[in-house]
Image (tube, helix red, strand yellow):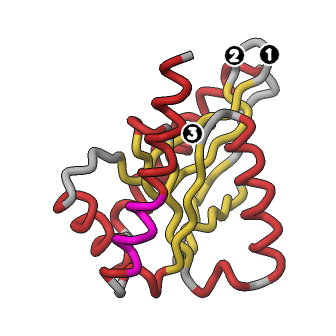
Amino acid sequence: MTCLILYGIDCLIKIKNFKMLSNDKKKMANQLINLSKQAKRKLVNKATHAENKFRKYLSDLNINYEFQKIIYLKDKENNVTDFYIADFYVAYYNMIIELDGDYHDNEDQIEKDIERDEMLNSMGYKILRINNLAVYNNKALYDIIKRFIKDNDLKKNSTDMN
């Protein structure tokens, strides 16, 4: 019996009694799917003040989003091999928004964030990282999101015309 530790934004989540029970890829994939859902529930229940404020902000702007979106990594046989949980996902732009607290300022986490962003970019996602401090400055946050959406609307429209 082991304990799997997942690091979420500004919180540490421990999932007790985690153990891969099988070497069978399908069973392991199902375990990862169940684990990801459990991790998502814990992250949603332990949402930070910045995340809650940002959720309200997106809702006030009528931006449709999914909070704590599970993104699965799959092998060639379409079996789940790993997963990420994105803070916010805006499907219209295929955009992930990550709120970064102080936890993301240490060198180890910066490297992990870069690797994660590269992986997600390779899967076609656009990544927007916002420091938690910007969440508390509505004008700065509005400008960041407005610029990102404008840039992506231009790209989307030019792609749609081709």
Amino acid at circle 1: Lys
The vertical placement of 116 against 37, above or below, is below
For residue 78, the mark is 2
Amino acid at circle 3: Ile
Q: Quadrant of residue 60?
A: bottom left
User: What residue is drawn where x is 57% and y is 39%?
Assistant: 71
Residue 43: percent from left, percent from top: 44, 62
Q: Name the residue under label 3.
A: 71
Mark 1 element type? loop
Secondary structure mostly seen in magenta is helix
Mark 3 element type? strand
The vertical placement of 81 against 26, above or below, is below
On-image quarter of the N terminus: bottom right
Could you classify mark 2 by the number of other residues whose Cα lies within 10 Å: few (under 14), some (14-19), or many (20 or more)?
few
For residue 34, the mark is none
Q: Mark 1 points at which residue?
A: 76
Which range is magenta?
Answer: 140-147
